Image (cartoon, rainbow, N blue to C red):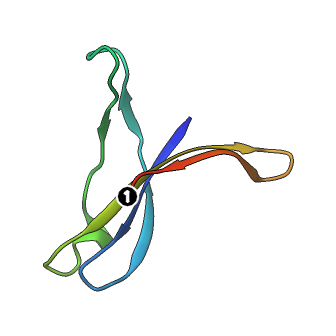
Amino acid sequence: MACAVEYTNAANESRISPILVKDIISEPDSIIMGWCIHGDATKKAGTIKFALRFYSINLDTYEFVYSLRTQ
């Protein structure tokens, strides 16, 4: 599955950031992910609201085959 962070920064701007670093080996039954918080996410001091989305896309139709989003 692909994974992305969907977030809203302190300026109330929504963005999507891909998760490029995933470790499924170090901790059994766990996924360790890295998200470098910078740029648009930190342009204004305050709270960042975020959720993770795990997904798979059919490359012929560009439709989601699978999509799971956290809150």
* Quadrant of the rendered image containing residue 6: bottom left
Quarter of the figure with residue 9: bottom left
Tell me which residue sits at (41%, 45%) in the image: 19
Q: Residue at x 37, y 21 (%)?
A: 24
Q: Residue furthest front?
A: 71
Residue 5, x across and y down, in percent: 40, 55
> Residue at the spot x=27%, y=51% of the render?
36
* Image quadrant in which the C terminus is located: bottom left
Mark 1 element type = loop
> Identity of the amino acid at label 1?
Gln
Horizontal side of 71 relative to 11 (left or right) equals right
On the rendered image, what quadrant is the N terminus found in? Answer: top right
Instruction: Determine the image quadrant of residue 56.
Output: top right
Horizontal placement of 3 versus 49: left or right?
right
> Which residue in the rendered view is the most extreme toward the right?
60
Residue 21 against residue 19 in the figure, above or below: above
- x, y percentage for residue 67? 60, 48
Residue extending furthest left? Answer: 45
In screen coordinates, is 54 left or right of 31? Answer: right
In front: 47, or 37?
47
Q: Does residue 6 lie above or below 45 as drawn?
A: above
Q: From what the image shows, is residue 31 above or below residue 57?
A: above
- Total marks placed: 1
Mark 1 = which residue?
Answer: 71
Q: Is residue 65 above or below residue 13?
A: above
Q: Residue at x 14, y 77 (%)?
A: 46
Q: Position of residue 10 (x, y in %)?
A: 23, 80
Check disc 1: other Cα within 10 Å, few if <14, some if 14-19, many if 20+. few
